[in-house]
Image: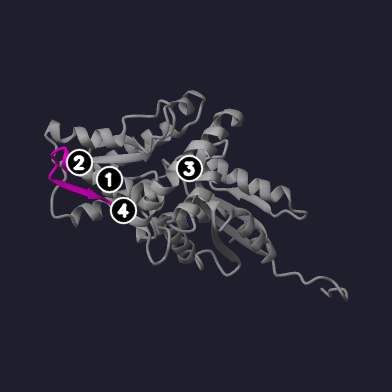
Amino acid sequence: MTIPAGHPAIPPRKIGVLLTNLGTPDAPDPKSVKRYLGEFLSDRRVVEIPAIAWQPILRGIILNTRPKKSAHAYGLVWSDEGSPLAAITRRQAQALTDAFGEGVIVDYAMRYGNPAIADRLAALKDAGCERILIAPLYPQYCAATTATANDKAFAALAGMRWQPAIRTLPPYHDDPAYIAALKESIESQLAGLDFVPERIVASFHGMPKRTLELGDPYHCHCQKTARLLSEAMNRELIIAFQSRFGPAKWLGPATDETLEALPAQGVRKVAVVAPGFSADCLETLEELAIRGRESFVAAGGTDFAYLPCLNDGAPGMAMLRTLLHRELQGWIP
């Protein structure tokens, strides 16, 4: 087909896949953390308190006290690649570069911080992507994670004159490929330990109990993941929820309290897994691997192991290829 003279250049049609995850500050310093927390904790999906009541607390107290403490925690897990979550998500996207054919571009973005979802969607559109699969990397659906990532993408699309066609990756908490990947990864890591754990704790990110009462399926998804994983491994798992914040009642039992109580119950050797996280981050590497260990040992435990997430390891990447290829059906051969 002949293009008329003076017509704007049109890139070849492509398909985009945008992996999205929670987010991270740009650096492990109080200024960067304050900017990140300001965006994160202002999200009405995350904190469902009326802004008129919440913003004075956030701006007057939390953002003037918490950033320094959180910056110290980030500093404990920061690497030459930067934030663990951003680095791992970037490696996941890179590992999928040629997974779906030369006409498919795989990129990644963060709900809070950089690279921003709106920026990467615009870049995919500029590269010729007329169809984009948005893939929130949250196995269990939660309004405060999956929904808000999609919200941000939809808000960006609302400002586009020419919108691409959009699909979103559904939650995969009970997908056989996900359960199989968890089983393979966990059993491989257990085999490499120099002790045999007496119990395994499956720690999921906490949410206020009110979210369950309002109809959020997150708690049910976590329970089903743990049940299916337990059945696949033929081993009982202790389910717990971490990262409580504020005075509200949260889903329980709490991970820190669970770890502190186990030695008194005769359990002195424990392994901890985090099946709700697709990539290791502050909540796993600092809260579980560092503080969780300290709490368990202080309570009388002798052996503790945190088993890393699927990350960009072989089982996790094989799972992502399976899930994404399924969602791209009809768009690619």
Circle number at residue 291? 1
Q: Nearest the camera: 176 or 224?
A: 224
79 versus 144 height, above or below: below
Q: Position of residue 232 (x, y in %)?
A: 29, 43
**Mark 1, secondary structure of its residue:** helix
User: Three-letter amino acid code at disc 2?
Assistant: Phe
Give the side of residue 48 with respect to residue 78, left or right: right
Circle number at residue 308? 4
Q: Where is residue 174 in the image (x, y as percent from the top left)?
A: 41, 40
**First along the sequence among labels 1 and 2:** 1
Q: Nearest the camera: 86 or 234?
A: 86
For discs 2 and 4, the disc positioned in front in the rendered view: 2
Q: Do callouts 2 and 3 mark residues in contact (Cβ within 8 Å)?
A: no
**Mark 4, secondary structure of its residue:** loop
Instruction: Give how far apart the Cα atoms at labels 1 and 4 are.
Output: 15 Å
Circle number at residue 64? 3
Circle number at residue 296? 2
Q: How many marks?
A: 4
**First along the sequence among labels 1 and 4:** 1
Task: Reply yes or no: does residue 298 show up in magenta.
Answer: yes
User: Three-letter amino acid code at disc 4?
Assistant: Pro
Instruction: Give how far apart the Cα atoms at labels 4 and 3 are.
Output: 32 Å
Give the side of residue 106 with respect to residue 314, left or right: right
Give the side of residue 104 with respect to residue 204, left or right: right
| Extreme residue in the right direction | 5
Magenta segment boundaries in residue numbering = 296-307
**First along the sequence among labels 2 and 3:** 3
